[in-house]
Amino acid sequence: MIAGTVAAVDLGATSGRVILGRVDGRAGTLELDQVARFPNGPVRLASGLHWDFTGLHRDLTAGLAEAFRRDPAIASIGVDAWAVDYALLRGGRMLGEPFHYRDDRNEVGVERVHAIVPFDELYRRNGLQFLPFNTLYQLAAEQQQHNGWLDLADSFLLIPDLIGFQLTGAKVAERTNASTTGLVAVDSGEWDDELIERLGFAASLFPPLVSPGESLGGLRSDVAAELGAPSTLEVVAVGSHDTASAVVAVPMRAESAAYISCGTWGLVGVELEHPVTTDAARDANFTNEGGVDGRVRFLHNVMGLWLLSESVRWWERDGETVELAELLAAAASVTDRVAVFDANDPRFLAPGDLPGRISEWCAEHGVAAPQSRAEFARSIIESLAEAFASAVRTASVLSTVDVETIHLVGGGVLNELLCQRTADRSGIPVLAGPVEATAIGNVLVQARAQGFASGDLESLRALVAAAFVPKRYVPRAR
């Protein structure tokens, strides 16, 4: 093994970043250097809620150029992003900016798909929990809109694959993210051509599948010139679904631990060798998504810190600034019992007045609604902690994994109250960290492909455990 540096492009639903990762597998060292951070978010157009992919690509390109100025010896680039959203292309050109998964067009897509393939059959085929924005529902909504884009398109690319195409010209679908479309067979890990045909999609739209660690090829010459990079530099497929990369960086023993990847969403589950597609798993709305090295991410989506960030955005809509640190400190000092609401209620999915919707939920369920912003914040944290704890208990029962430890990674690590209350409500110790788990997982898969690290996931996780010591939260009496 040799030591070296790779560049990770890590795109979340609210922000993106470019991070340099320096790995020396011989010495057992792993270091990160954030080069660029930029906002990401929805744009409402006449056609609906979209991503500003053009602006996002501009910002990540500028970030990569800065990365090469700092370290011209970068060995490769890897890209991860959120799941399910996509662009349709013809002749290499996007047919409009990608839709945002929170757009309200998806309901008609759900009805259309389930009229053709009942959900119980769908679950047996793809192993995915029901989420109204899963890609197959979005594509069915495209059909219903009769805008002709599906007929016009000659290719379909998920967001990280779309970026890979812009960098290299290669049209592929990375497996961990493709598994979230609902169009990949859970048993084989390949495109389900029969399902695709039944739903009326053209099989030719969907590109070849590649696995984490495979090369997409070198940079396009114009991109290399813009970045100040050699055209021979590789773009490497990583766990391009951000949660797949985050799970790589969870320093856990798979047989006894659960994980929570906590950011805009909270992804709560266990890592398995084989999917669980029982009726009980379907009824509990657990999903089987592809992981790095063929592992299965058996998990449940919880609404996540979106509940808090969107509430803050709503409070700030008239120009007032809400300092998150001060809000969380005030929430921690709330001593009265606050409402614990269903964090997964669909009413909380769309942008808007989340505090009002929380009050609405409380009124419907005969629960006293929060009155102050501190109480709203505490109610959100308590509700998330309870949802996390419940999902861990269910994952343990459905998978037969005896959970002894919960690893919490991602931005939620910085929310100490949430970490502690998750430990309290679950009765299980929480190990919090690392914060930048997604970028770390991205870096490690590239590092292994380049020969800077070696071994299985457990070997990679040993590097994480040595470099980032987690904070332990012990359950307290509730």
Image (cartoon, grey):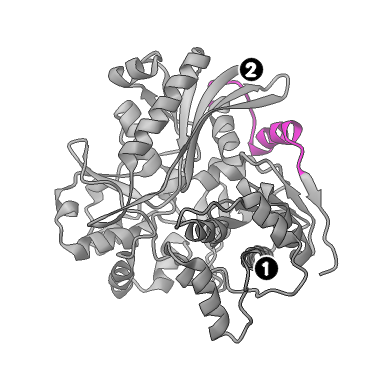
What residue do we see at 54% from left, 65% from top? 286
Nearest-to-viewer mark from 1 and 2? 1
Image location of residue 17, percent across then percent down: 50, 34
Viewer-proximal residue, 240 or 365? 365
Q: Residue furthest bottom?
A: 366
Q: Which residue is mark 1?
A: 386
Viewer-proximal residue, 378 or 77? 378
Q: Which residue is mark 2?
A: 1
| Magenta segment boundaries in residue numbering | 449-470
What residue do we see at 58% from left, 43% from top? 246
Q: In which quadrant of the rendered image does the C terminus lie?
A: bottom right
Is residue 402 in view from this perspective?
A: no
Q: Is residue 427 left or right of residue 359?
A: right
Q: Examine the image and state in which quarter residue 420 appears.
A: bottom right
Q: In which quadrant of the rendered image does the N terminus lie?
A: top right
The label on residue 262 is none
Q: Is residue 462 magenta?
A: yes
Q: Residue furthest right?
A: 477
Image location of residue 430, percent across then percent down: 76, 53
